[in-house]
């Protein structure tokens, strides 16, 4: 059951109407990393989750994302209402004709830049900033918590980055304050999903089947750059920053044979975080 609490989660402030910035902000309303996508991602995961603490967290965050959607909608409306209608009011009579005369260049520019003016009547629309309609294809849930939580962490990271880019594109102090709150909440969500992933032991690799031990820790050095194995930057990267102990194999295509792979003791365990694997 949902109730409508008429208070915003955080007070939305916009100092000046700005239809062009509103167009950009649509990314966080109906875009791939926006608030609707976030809410639908976590609701659908939560409704299918049998683990009670994880379900509780997913549905709480999903509900908060709807509150964010409400805040973005309020921001959009405040950015859109006023200036365009005021400009429309400036144009008397057949304003389309006046526009064609080039008398209101600023309004022409705003209209061209801000499609929701024409199609949405200055209300928020379920599109991204380029006008692409919102789609469930933005949600990549696969129904296995160690995979989905990793995707959720990445989704929160993308939402955070999108807010960061938007904050850089407005001088409006009220807008910056609102968007900084929303950006910060995505950081908090990312931490919550990290914690939920850590609570699943083991959580790697996702799923139940362990994989072939012979190739689970092999780095195929499929590049020829004159560097020895140990000096190759990619090898140094995976060897230097994990304790997984990667073996290095030369390019398999050069020998024309299947590479001889080392025997390893089974060390890869399956994640068993869910019955929904
Ligand atoms: Mn959010
Ligand atoms: Mn979030």
Image: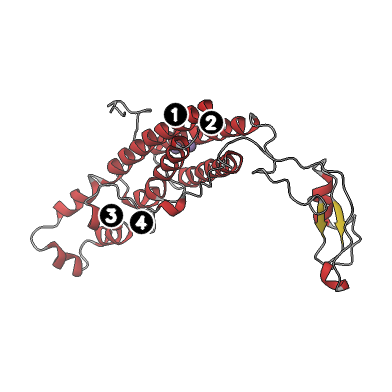
Q: Which of labels 1 and 2 is toward the front?
A: 1
Q: Secondary structure at mark 1?
A: helix
Task: Measure the C-alpha gap from mark 2 to mark 4.
Answer: 28 Å
How would you rate the neighbour count of disc 4 (Cα within 10 Å): few for under 14, some for 14-19, many for 20 or more? few
Task: Measure the C-alpha gap from mark 1 to mark 3.
Answer: 31 Å
Q: Secondary structure at mark 4?
A: loop
Q: In the displayed image of the protein, which residue is found farthest to the left?
A: 93
Q: Which residue is labeled 2 in the image?
A: 188
Task: Measure the C-alpha gap from mark 4 to mark 1.
Answer: 26 Å
Q: Quadrant location of the C terminus?
A: top right
Q: Is the CB of mark 3 within 8 Å of ligand 1?
A: no
Q: Which residue is labeled 1 in the image?
A: 60
Query: Residue 141: x, y in percent?
Result: 51, 46
Q: Which residue is labeled 3 in the image?
A: 116
Q: Is the CB of mark 2 within 8 Å of ligand 2?
A: yes
Q: Residue at x 23, y 51 (%)?
A: 84
Q: Is residue 185 above or below residue 76?
A: above
- First in sequence: mark 1 vs mark 3: 1
Task: Measure the C-alpha gap from mark 4 to mark 3.
Answer: 12 Å
Q: Is residue 172 above or below residue 5?
A: below
> Is the residue under label 4 in contact with that under label 2 (CB below 8 Å)?
no
Query: Residue 133: x, y in percent?
Result: 35, 56
How would you rate the neighbour count of disc 3 (Cα within 10 Å): few for under 14, some for 14-19, many for 20 or more? many
- Side of 246 relative to 69 (left or right): right
Q: Residue at x 28, y 54 (%)?
A: 116
- First in sequence: mark 2 vs mark 3: 3
Q: Is residue 67 above or below residue 256?
A: above
Q: Residue at x 20, y 52 (%)?
A: 87
Q: Which of labels 2 and 4 is toward the front?
A: 4
Q: Nearer the viewer, residue 130 or 212?
A: 212
How would you rate the neighbour count of disc 1 (Cα within 10 Å): few for under 14, some for 14-19, many for 20 or more? some
């Amino acid at each position: 059951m949902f109730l409508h609490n008429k208070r915003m989660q955080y007070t939305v402030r916009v100092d000046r109407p700005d239809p062009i910035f509103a167009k950009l902000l649509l990314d966080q309303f109906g875009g791939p990393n926006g608030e609707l996508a976030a809410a639908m991602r976590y609701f659908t995961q939560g409704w299918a989750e049998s683990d009670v603490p994880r379900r509780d967290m997913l549905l709480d965050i999903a509900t908060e994302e709807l509150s964010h959607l409400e805040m973005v909608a309020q921001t959009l409306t405040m950015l859109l209402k006023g200036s365009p209608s005021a400009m429309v009011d400036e144009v008397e009579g057949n304003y389309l004709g006046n526009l064609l005369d080039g008398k209101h260049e600023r309004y022409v520019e705003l209209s061209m830049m801000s499609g929701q003016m024409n199609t949405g009547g200055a209300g928020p629309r379920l599109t991204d900033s380029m006008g692409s309609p919102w789609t469930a294809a933005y949600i990549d849930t696969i129904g296995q918590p160690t995979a989905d939580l990793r995707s959720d962490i990445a989704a929160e990271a993308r939402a955070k980055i999108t807010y960061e880019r938007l904050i850089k594109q407005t001088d409006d102090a009220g807008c910056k304050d609102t968007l900084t709150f929303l950006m910060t909440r995505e950081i908090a969500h990312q931490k919550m999903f990290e914690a939920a992933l850590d609570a699943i032991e083991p959580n790697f690799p996702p799923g139940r089947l362990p994989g072939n031990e012979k190739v689970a820790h092999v780095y195929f050095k499929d590049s020829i750059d004159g560097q020895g194995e140990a000096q190759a930057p990619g090898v140094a990267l995976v060897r230097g920053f994990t304790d997984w102990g990667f073996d290095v194999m030369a390019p398999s295509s050069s020998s024309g044979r299947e590479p001889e792979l080392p025997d390893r003791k089974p060390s890869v365990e399956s994640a068993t975080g869910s019955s929904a694997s």
